[in-house]
Image (spheres, rainbow, N blue to C red):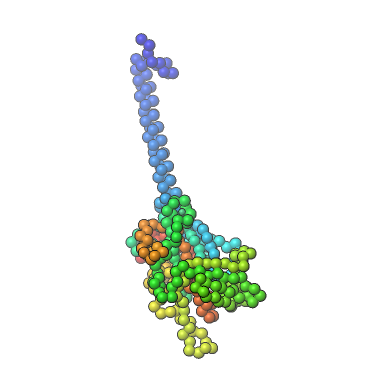
Amino acid sequence: MNSVILDTEFSIFDFRFWIYFLNLAWRSLVGVVFLGAMFLFAGCSNELIPVGEAGITTNSSAYVTKVFEYQYAPGQHASQIPSVEEGNNFVGEPWKNSKPFTSLGGWGGYLVAGFDHAIDNGNGPDIAIYTQPSVASEPGVVFVMTDVNKDGIPNDGAWLEIKGSEYNHAETIHNYEVTYYKPGASGYVSWKDNQGKTGTLVPEFGTDSWWWKGYGAGSSVTFTGVKLPNAYVNSSKDPAIEFWLPQTGLFKFGYAECYENEDYHSSLKANLVDISSAVDGSGRAANLSKVHFIKIQSGVFQIAGWLNEISTEISGAADLHLLDKKSYQ
Ligand SMILES: [Ca+2]
Ligand SMILES: [Ca+2]
């Protein structure tokens, strides 16, 4: 009878064949287990790739890792901001190595940023937005977005607004829009809004200081967003003197760069944002379990005398769940 001959020259009737066969089988089993483990590991790694279907790894950063968009709105720092500014000072730990804050300029200026993972909506606040820091509040509206299509880009429908204390204030205008016009010889920036109003921004620091070169060759720039109530009131009875005070009772919670409100954390020097406060365009709770992107926008359209324009300044943002809880609780 012909025996099955392998390339080892052993027959199946030879005990050495069975030793060889068992040895081969064992090695194959080890190989299969090894390959399986590799696939499993690769699968897990995919889930841990930043943004998209993001998870948290030991390498995840608590801080913003990317700025997607930066647009400065006309304001007093225009001449100091490089025309190629992309808001990158907002990335990483705030103030590290003397890193400066990021100015959003006057009403409408904004920044869009993301993290290398999803920020979970846990109990209580979830996101810290670091202030300038200064002492005078210049409220910025905060928006969030979930990476629904998992492509790592903030292109997932409308931004969801964090419902702050002035969301339903009589002077708050949702879907507000302003077009600013490049100054001529006067150096003044004129503007027109979508409520039929027009006006002029008179620079305090010399002509042309309010127009950012980052707008390029355009003769106008348009911003859309939420207009909040005026943040300051001149309490002086003497017309020759200005004495600006914060409007009492306003901006209690839910805005960036607010120092007197309930969610300002004095140690972190940050306003703490709860994802649960996000609402849709109709003001209904968005019920988000996590977010990947944030947008912060200068929300007050006011030139408060010598205080100048109310322009939100911010220094970065963090996932509170990745910070040492002792630092903020
Ligand atoms: Ca929360
Ligand atoms: Ca997306």
- For this orientation, the residue located farthest to the right is 185
Q: How many numbered dots are placed on residues in this image?
A: 0
- For this orientation, the residue located farthest to the front is 196
Residue 272 location, x and y as percent? 40, 66
Q: Which of 296 and 21 is in front in this view?
A: 296
Residue at 45% across / 57% down in the picture? 157
* Quarter of the image that includes the C terminus: bottom left
Q: Quadrant of residue 267?
A: bottom left
Judged left or right of residue 78, residue 118 is left
Q: Quadrant of residue 292?
A: bottom left
* Quarter of the image that includes the N terminus: top left
Residue 196 location, x and y as percent? 51, 74
Residue 29 location, x and y as percent? 37, 30
Residue at 50% across / 89% down in the picture? 238
Query: Could one spot residue 47 in this view of the protein?
Result: yes
Residue 218 location, x and y as percent? 62, 65
Q: Where 228 sits versus 319, above or below?
A: below
Q: Which of 191 and 300 is in front in this view?
A: 191
Q: Which of 48 and 73 is in front in this view?
A: 73
Residue at 49% across / 73% down in the picture? 195
Q: Where 202 sits versus 277, above or below?
A: below
- For this orientation, the residue located farthest to the left is 123
Query: Could one spot residue 310 in this view of the protein?
Result: no
- For this orientation, the residue located farthest to the top is 1
Residue at 48% across / 67% down in the picture? 225
Q: Nearer the viewer, residue 229 or 178?
A: 178
